[in-house]
């Protein structure tokens, strides 16, 4: 097995929304905001080469949305899915599976591209993976969350015939080396791939833990649909990560790809931060 970091650039989101009830005087120590109170976030995906498969976990925001939409998020950086794949000698046609942790636009937007007037899969040879519970949640969204679920990102996957579902059951095996954990606080049935790699456990955190700045327990996003459930899930996952010495892969941290955790007098805090290729 091999793991590769796939950078797809950066975007900006409101710092207050990203840290919920935590005061700016605290969260700005780790994630400083610009003059518009916006913080910069990565859209970092993961490529897994294993058992003859090339599995891409999440796809970033993509580039098919109109200028007005993109203007809200201040995209920056030179990295794209294509340039990141090319760095390791791959291209889109090599991807066998696209695993979508959830269907918010910054996680699945790159799954679909425009070809003329048509919206088609960006990865022609790939099977796309979600779960039925989350899929239905996204296709029939609540009013609070529907701005994050763009039909142009979602419905063409099903229309292509390439969509498959996994069971929404915690611990279900995706491959021999990847099992799927579930979290329900951020959005319904978000999937967290847990990967056995070089004798260690790598847990892809998606939006349960966007960055190192979110490690303290009260630091929960206002974007979360059920923040108290996020708090419960976060405490359970981070405690498990300390006890079992997991490596956490961070999708949105603007600087840090991976971290480990430790218990301190102040609670769970970062132990070490490093790049994926340092494992």
Image (cartoon, rainbow, N blue to C red):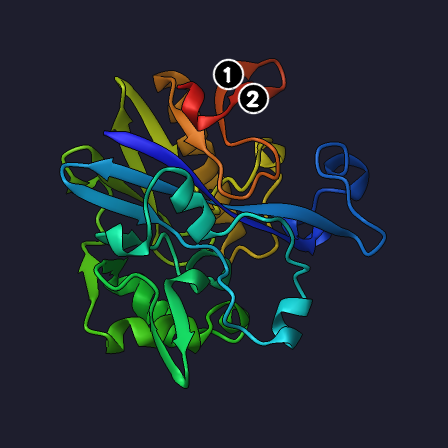
Badge 1 crowding class, 10 Å Cα cut-off, few under 14, some 14 to 19, many 20 or more, is: some
Judge whether 75 appears above or below 244 on screen: below
Q: Camera-side residue: 120 or 208? A: 120
When asked about the image quadrant of residue 218, the answer is: top right
When asked about the image quadrant of residue 144, the answer is: bottom right
Q: Quadrant of the N terminus?
A: top left
Image position, residue 18 (x, y; %): 64, 49
The mark total stands at 2
Q: Quadrant of the C terminus?
A: top left
Direction right: furthest residue: 35
Image position, residue 204 (x, y; %): 39, 38
Please tell me whether mark 1 sits on a helix, a strand or a loop. strand
Which residue is depicted at the point 50% across and 52% down?
A: 80
Q: Which residue is mark 2?
A: 270
Q: Is residue 140 left or right of residue 65?
A: left
Q: Which residue is mark 1?
A: 262
Which residue is depicted at the point 48% across and 62% down?
A: 62
Quick check: marks 1 and 2 in contact, CB under 8 Å? Answer: yes
Image position, residue 149 (x, y; %): 46, 70
Judge whether 252 appears above or below 69 on screen: above
Q: Is residue 186 visible?
A: yes
Residue 279, numbered label: none
Judge whether 124 appears above or below 181 on screen: below
Judge whether 4 appears above or below 20 on screen: above
Point out the tag, 1 or 2, that comes first from the N-terminus.
1
For the residues labelled 1 and 2, the Cα–Cα distance comes to 6 Å
Q: Is residue 217 left or right of residue 30?
A: left
Image position, residue 223 (x, y; %): 57, 57
Q: Camera-side residue: 221 or 248? A: 248
């Amino acid at each position: 097995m091999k793991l590769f970091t796939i950078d797809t650039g950066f975007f900006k989101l409101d710092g207050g929304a990203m840290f919920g009830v935590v005061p700016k005087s605290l969260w700005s120590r780790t994630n400083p905001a610009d003059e518009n109170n916006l913080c910069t976030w990565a859209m970092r995906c993961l490529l897994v080469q294993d058992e003859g498969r090339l599995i891409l976990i999440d796809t970033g925001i993509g580039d098919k949305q109109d200028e007005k939409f993109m203007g809200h998020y201040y995209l920056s950086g030179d990295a794209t899915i294509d340039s990141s794949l090319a760095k390791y000698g791959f291209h889109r046609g090599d991807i066998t599976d696209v695993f979508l942790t959830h269907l918010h636009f910054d996680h699945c937007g790159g799954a679909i591209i425009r070809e003329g007037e048509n919206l088609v899969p960006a990865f022609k040879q790939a099977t796309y993976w979600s779960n039925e519970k989350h899929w239905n949640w996204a296709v029939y969204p609540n009013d609070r969350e529907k701005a994050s679920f763009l039909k142009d990102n979602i419905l063409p996957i099903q229309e292509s015939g390439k969509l498959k579902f996994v069971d929404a059951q915690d611990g279900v095996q995706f491959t021999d080396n990847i099992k799927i954990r579930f979290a329900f606080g951020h959005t319904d049935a978000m999937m967290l791939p847990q990967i056995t790699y070089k004798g260690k456990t790598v847990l892809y955190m998606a939006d349960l833990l966007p960055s190192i700045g979110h490690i303290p327990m009260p630091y929960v996003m206002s974007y979360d649909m059920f923040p108290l459930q996020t708090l419960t899930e976060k405490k359970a996952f981070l405690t498990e990560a300390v006890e079992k010495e997991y490596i956490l892969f961070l999708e949105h941290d603007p600087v840090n790809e991976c971290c480990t955790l430790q218990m301190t007098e102040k609670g769970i805090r970062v132990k070490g931060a490093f790049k994926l290729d340092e494992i």
